[in-house]
Amino acid sequence: MKHNTAMRLKVAYLLILMTVASLVLEANGGATKYTAMYVFGDSLSDVGNNKYFIDTLAKADYLPFGIDFGGGLTAEMVGLPLLPSYADVIAKGDSILFGVNYASAGAGILRDTGYLFGHIIPFEEQINNLRKTVDQLRGKLHGNEVSKYLSNALVFVDIGANDYLNNYFRRKYYPSSHIYNLEQFADLLINLYRKHILEIQGLGLRKFLILEAPPIGCGPIRVRNMKCNATLNHAVAMFNTRLKSVVHDLGSIHPGSAFIYAPSSQLFQSLFDFAEAYGFKVKDKACCGGSDSSKRTKSMCFRNTIPCPNRNEYLYWDGAHPTEAANRILAAYIHNATYL
Ligand SMILES: *[C@@H]1O[C@H](CO)[C@@H](O)[C@H](O)[C@H]1NC(C)=O
Ligand SMILES: *[C@@H]1O[C@H](CO)[C@@H](O)[C@H](O)[C@H]1NC(C)=O
């Protein structure tokens, strides 16, 4: 059996978000249906871009990852099939017709974020891969068809958490915290983020759904006595404040494009704060490996670990990633929030 269910549990969440975005754009007078979708990000969105790298620890192409992801259900919600990873487009010639997922577990906005994991694909490289996809499209379609096709495609971006977890707060390995204070670091990330969004736009893409970086201090490996790590959440909040204003600015500078900001971090925080009310009995331990205290120090579920049987009662799947159940609720709330 091929475990291409890898990390796809996170994609269920992505695809629900696509429905959300489509409704929002519809409300704004935009297209009701996307020609394609292009996904950029980290482990919350990766569907297997790291799986062909033998020199990386940032992989999830093994069981029990994907256990709650059916594959069929969510795809029909947006009318787009499940997107192939860019790695599979290259290795197996998977179709690029409905879009491609470029996200890479461990990746960040900065080039060297996550290098401790080994081989990962930073944001900049993910965009270079999009460039290759666009070239491929130009080989298949006429020039003005390509423009039309791209302008009706949706770009989904969820990146930034690793620049804190696997860069700034890894003081032993990265100089960032010695060079920048948190304000300066957030500015550095945001300037680069903005530049990258404009590069994607420069390739002809016009519709963007941009997610906040998640409250990284609430992952089971960082929670102490039911409390999220305030230092980490504060750092990410500084980033998100800036992100929100950049997304807003981009919208006013480029009226021909749609930039939607999803307050996903705030929403997830309320899911954590009121976990019981949402039906979660456990919010401070991971479903996979959470009862074993030695494994609480790891952010990922280990190969062939038997996960908790009552997965719907856990907020977190592993030390850093939410369960499918949590993602579904989050997506529904983002849907509601993007209308406000
Ligand atoms: C919160 O995270 C920071 C950065 O990793 C760490 O230095 C600090 O000790 C943590 N605080 C608590 C209370 O765990
Ligand atoms: C959606 O948001 C409104 C306004 O905040 C709130 O009253 C309502 O309960 C929300 N609905 C859901 C399903 O979250």
Image: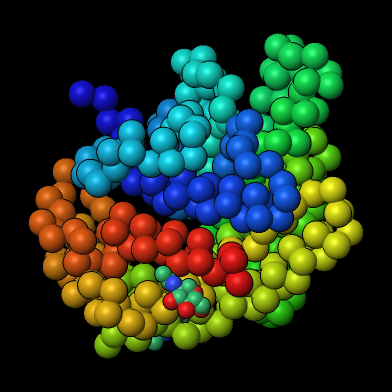
Camera sees residue 56:
no
* Residue that lies at the very extreme toward the right in this rendered image: 253
Q: Is 254 rendered above or below residue 76?
A: below
Q: Quadrant of residue 144?
A: top right
Q: Position of residue 18 (x, y in %)?
A: 53, 47
Residue that appears at 67% across and 76% down: 241
Q: Is 273 rendered above or below residue 63?
A: below
* In the displayed structure image, the side of residue 130 where residue 250 appears, left or right: right
User: What sort of colour scheme is used for the picture?
Assistant: rainbow
Residue that appears at 50% across and 32% down: 80
* In the displayed structure image, the side of residue 299 where residue 93 appears, left or right: right
Q: Quadrant of residue 1?
A: top left
Tell how many labels: 0
Taking the image in four quarters, ligand 1 sits in the one at bottom left
Camera sees residue 155:
yes
Q: Position of residue 333 (x, y in %)?
A: 45, 67
Camera-side residue of 55 and 5: 5
Residue that appears at 73% across and 32% down: 150
Q: Quadrant of residue 278?
A: bottom left
Q: Position of residue 274 (x, y in %)?
A: 33, 82
Residue that appears at 89% across and 59% down: 253
Q: Is 81 rendered above or below residue 314?
A: above
**On-image quarter of the C terminus:** bottom right
Q: Position of residue 101 (x, y in %)?
A: 54, 36
Q: Is 46 rendered above or below residue 267?
A: above
* In the displayed structure image, the side of residue 330 where residue 209 appears, left or right: right
